[in-house]
Amino acid sequence: MTTIIDGNAIGDDIRGELEGSVEVLDEAGVTPGLATVLMSEDPASSTYVSMKQRACEEIGINGIHVEIEPDAPADELFSTLDELNADPEVHGILVQMPVPDHVDTWEVLNYINPAKDVDGFHPENVGRLVAGRPRFKPATPHGVQRLLQETGVETEGADAVVIGRSDIVGKPMANLLIQKGPVGNATVTICHSRTADLAAKTRQADIVIAAVGYPGIVDGSMLKEGAVVIDVGVNRVDADNERGYKLVGDVDFESAREVASAITPVPGGVGPMTITMLLWNTVKAAGDLEGVDIDLP
Ligand SMILES: NC(=O)c1ccc[n+]([C@@H]2O[C@H](COP(=O)([O-])OP(=O)(O)OC[C@H]3O[C@@H](n4cnc5c(N)ncnc54)[C@H](OP(=O)(O)O)[C@@H]3O)[C@@H](O)[C@H]2O)c1
């Protein structure tokens, strides 16, 4: 029987427990605060930010939202970040990407106070993760790690293939899996658009994690019997419904589930975990910055 890994249920459990951590902070007189900064008119970016803000409210995190006109000078974003970096009520700062072309993404990531960088993209936090001493694990790969943990997947000694080498998913994902310790100790192969024979790599893998953005790039014929399949991809494809589209992952779910021992669906797999682990990072940031000891779930 193939296990369908339920990211909604696992995410809900973690969020429920996080509420307990928020209460502990509350007893110490601290309300965790997450500031989101949006400098874009892209409807998808705006939806993501609203989802994050709503999720914050639900567990008692104070959401602060700043919108900057997309054609405003870059300095306006940097002075906003100056204020948020210094604001004692703000424990986490998230600049919704992408920023407009005239703003240098790398400069933005460098500018956020690393102790408030709940996305985990500041070079200091990237370095810490690679060195095996993470402060904030980026939310999506951290969420995947938790899905593997809660599903009881043995990563130690496993052959894992991560497809995708982006800074936000593929690279940190591979880095987490090679670390010594729980949900680590895997032997990891990272594949990308120049990989010569993707199927030859995935067929050897005990764990396949797809983070590409291309529907159906992995199907059942590319998997070893009993592999664990984590589908990070989110792709819009045309559909005969009211919206005219539906969301699918990178994995051809129907053929893959015939072979896999466990698999995440899209939607309802990795997606809910991403927001959950952003909340997790924000609560952690509040505890660290305020010197309050909290047990994080
Ligand atoms: N569920 C969630 O919460 C969540 C969060 C983040 C992202 N996502 C989704 O995850 C997917 C990946 O996101 P991302 O930000 O990492 O994307 P990205 O920055 O576009 O990276 C995609 C990666 O896929 C690789 N790739 C492209 N074509 C390939 C091919 N034919 N074979 C093997 N590798 C190939 C690229 O290789 P090169 O480096 O060689 O170009 C690149 O490394 C997207 O669908 C995104 O929407 C979901």
Image (spheres, grey):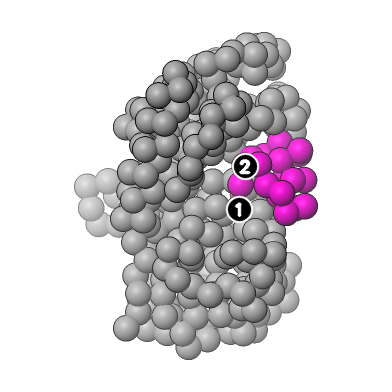
Position in image of residue 61 (x %, y %): 41, 27
Q: Is residue 199 above or below residue 98?
A: below
Q: On the rendered image, what quadrant is the N terminus found in?
A: bottom left
Residue 49 vertical placement versus 275 (above, below): above
Q: Would you call the spot at circle 1 few (<14 residues within 10 Å), some (14-19), or many (20 or more)?
A: many
- Label 1, ligand 1: CB separation under 8 Å: yes
Residue at far left of view: 242
- At numbered mark 2, what does the secondary structure look like: helix, strand or loop? loop
Kind of residue at disc 1: Val
In the rendered view, does 263 fall on the left or right side of 109?
left
Residue identified by numbered label 2: 136
- Is residue 219 found inside the magenta-colored segment of the image? no
Q: Quadrant of residue 17?
A: top left
Q: In this rendering, does residue 6 appear at all?
A: yes
* Distance between mark 1 and mark 2 Cα atoms: 14 Å
Residue 261, position as x, y percentages in the image: 42, 80
In this rendering, does residue 267 appear at all? Answer: no
122 in the magenta segment: yes
Using a 10 Å C-alpha cutoff, classify the residue at mark 2 as few (fewer than 14 neighbours), some (14 to 19) or many (20 or more). Answer: many
Q: Label 1: which residue? A: 169
Q: Amino acid at mark 2?
A: Phe
Q: Quadrant of residue 105?
A: top right
